[in-house]
Amino acid sequence: MSPAANITLYSSPADGIVALPNGPGVDWAVVALDLARFESADEGIHVLPMSDLDRAQKALDTLYTNAHRFGITVTTTQQTFIGDIGRGIAARLDGSWTVEAGNCLLSPSDSRSRLNFLWDSLGGSLSYVMQSYSEQVSAVAFLCSETGLELAVLRRPWDGQIVVGALAPDAQFASLGTMTPVSVVAPDVAGVLKKVTEKLLPSYEHALAQAHFRLLRGVLDQIRAARTSGALSRVWALDEDLCQHWHGLDQHLRGRYGTLPKSLDDLLRGTDAALDEGSAQDEEGAVQLLEHWLQQGTQLVDLVQSLDPDFTAPPVTPSAPASLPPGPPRQGHRPGMSR
């Protein structure tokens, strides 16, 4: 007899029947799905298209027969699959978004690891769920925009409400003390979409722009130090970092403000063209590049500060939230505290 395993089946308009295997004997559950000719989709997720009903019925019969043989429990749920919820949100957002779902019940789970980049206000809805109810989250959908935004969508375990939050591009972004994005929660796609558009995305764009600003300013300080010490060999590496944060700041300033002041727009467009031409290839070019970035970068810092003084505000020191999001207390476990 195999170790305990479970397969949860969802009905999906897009995928047909979606299966999430889990449990200590998950490998046996995957074998049962493979024998039934379920197709492997996103991480840990299997699907059975319903385009051929006879084939689908045979596949289900095979699945139940082998599940009984292997000691696997198969359950069905009326809940909407999280991938469909993610697609429903992405289709109504501006721009182009891709959607990928993941099985968080696997061990290890790449999807659960991606949630380590959660970027949420202290005590926010998504942060609270992952801090106190992480083991009860079965699946997550990741929405990625063409401009580099990444959202995580999951269900709140105790009531099934939809939670959407932001992910940081890199671990250092969440440690900069910027004003953090604010996750949102609602009972349905329409409700959460409104909050994503009006609350989450604006706060996310602002946090990204502010983070790129602070990181860019840090790179400029390093360039000044390199000039003082004569360590010109460091300019090439600093140039790459500067390009990354310059482009990031440019992109998210335009996303946040739309139309920028002409002086800032001209500076960004002119320097974007220079960045695309490549880096210096010799010492003389490195010196010229260094001086160019100090001049342009200093001008950019001054213009951005005049646009929004908040970008140069001191880092925010996190404080304990006044109250926690509503959630049922777990026996022997204080809400809001890590296990």
Image (tube, grey):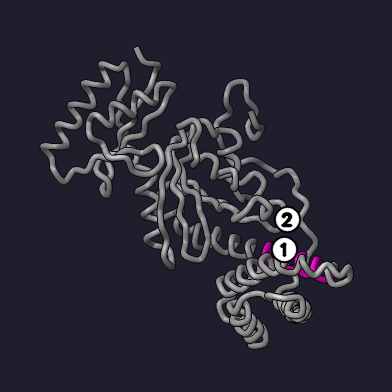
Query: Quarter of the image holding residue 139?
Result: top left
Give the left or right position of residue 113, taking residue 301 as reference.
Answer: left
Q: Is residue 299 visible?
A: no
Amino acid marked by disc 1: Leu
Residue linked to disc 2: 176
Residue segment shown in magenta? 209-224
In contact (CB < 8 Å): disc 2 and disc 1 = yes
- The residue at the point 57 percent across, 75 percent down is 254
Residue toward you, 64 or 227: 227
Residue toward you, 312 or 70: 70
Give the left or right position of residue 320, taking residue 165 as reference.
Answer: right
Q: Mark 1 Cα within 10 Å, few/some/many (few <14, many 20+)?
A: many
Q: Is residue 138 visible?
A: yes
Which dot marks residue 215? 1
Quadrant housing the C terminus? top right
Q: Residue furthest toward the top? A: 1
Disc with the residue nearer the chain's start (2 vs 1): 2
**Residue 195 drawn in magenta:** no
Q: Residue furthest toward the right? A: 228
**Residue 219 drawn in magenta:** yes
> Does 202 appear above or below 38?
below
Q: Mark 2 Cα within 10 Å, few/some/many (few <14, many 20+)?
A: some
Percent position (x, y) of residue 160?
A: 43, 39
Q: Residue furthest toward the front? A: 282
Percent position (x, y) of residue 289?
A: 73, 78
